[in-house]
Image (cartoon, rainbow, N blue to C red):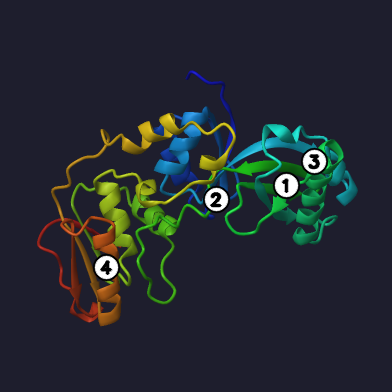
Amino acid sequence: MSEQSFEMIAKTFQGLEETLAQELTALGADEIQIGRRMVSFRGDKEMMYKANFCLRTAIRILKPIKNFVAKNADEVYEQIKAIHWEDYLDIDKTFAVDAVVFSEEFRHSKFVSYKVKDAIVDYFRDAYNKRPSVRISKPDVLLNIHIAETKCTLSLDSSGESLHRRGYRQEAVEAPLNEVLAAGMILMTGWHGECDLIDPMCGSGTIPIEAALIAKNIAPGVFRKEFAFEKWLDFDQELFDKIYNDDSQEREFTHKIYGYDNNPQANEIATHNIKAAGVSKDVTLKLQPFQQFEQPKEKAVII
């Protein structure tokens, strides 16, 4: 590791923490610790880029910049204002604050995010008589404040849009299965492409697609348009390109994935999504109600 390492937090769904920790181990992260709906770990910038690009069961990757204790909103304000903000934000860049609050003292997450926002704006206004603007959708820098009782963590969100939004979904049926959840379900079976896999009620094809990406070891980030860290002051384009273009880990998949559904519209949507993900030759879709399910001839995993 050429660069110094730092702490990161990978957020996930309840129940997938173990699976995410295994993924992080395989990725080569250090000091992996399981928490509630999250796994903390250490690594350098390359590890942060890889975590966003490669992890299948992470929702977002946070980089903490300050841990502090605050008993009320004014103390939060003071702590945030004391940060050397030039390290993270340019005056002409936009930012947004996302607050997650589990606390008796701070009942309102909106109020907390306003306080953080005010502190940052006032910091720049006092120093430069100018201020960065707040932008809710697609800001240049996305911040996350997490408060548990009086313990506060301010982090940079390196992901931006939730990582479950892989980028291959053309359209979805009603109540589509979250991609992170789908990948987690597959990984929890222990399947990595050693035999056929069957999804008898596949909807818009999320499980078959995630299964194909797992079987071929294709990084889920390859379809995404952007990650938040690409707008950071210290973004290393060359390093990210190297990760993005490295397909040395990809492998052959010699079995098949079958997706059945009795809804013609779902079948059509699944066909589009599977094509967009580039896994058409690995997945066979069929319009078939669950009642007609037959025992497969070969060994297979069914989800």
Q: Amino acid at mark 2?
A: Gly
Residues tagged 3 and 2 counted as in contact (Cβ below 8 A) = no
The mark nearer the N terminus, 4 or 2, is 2
Residue under the point 76% across and 43% down: 152
Q: Is residue 150 left or right of residue 97?
A: right
Label 4: element kind: helix
The mark nearer the N terminus, 4 or 1, is 1
Question: Circle 3 is placed at which residue position?
Answer: 124
The mark nearer the N terminus, 1 or 3, is 3
The mark nearer the N terminus, 2 or 1, is 1
Q: Amino acid at mark 3?
A: Phe
Q: Is 86 situated above or below 265?
A: above
Question: Circle 4 is placed at which residue position?
Answer: 272
3D distance between C-alphas at marks 4 and 2? 26 Å
The mark nearer the N terminus, 3 or 4, is 3
Q: Is residue 96 visible?
A: yes
Closer to viewer: mark 3 or mark 4: 3
Question: Circle 2 is placed at which residue position?
Answer: 160
The mark nearer the N terminus, 3 or 2, is 3
Q: Amino acid at mark 4?
A: His
Instruction: From the top left corner, tell me how far across and down residue 134 is, in percent.
Output: 70, 54
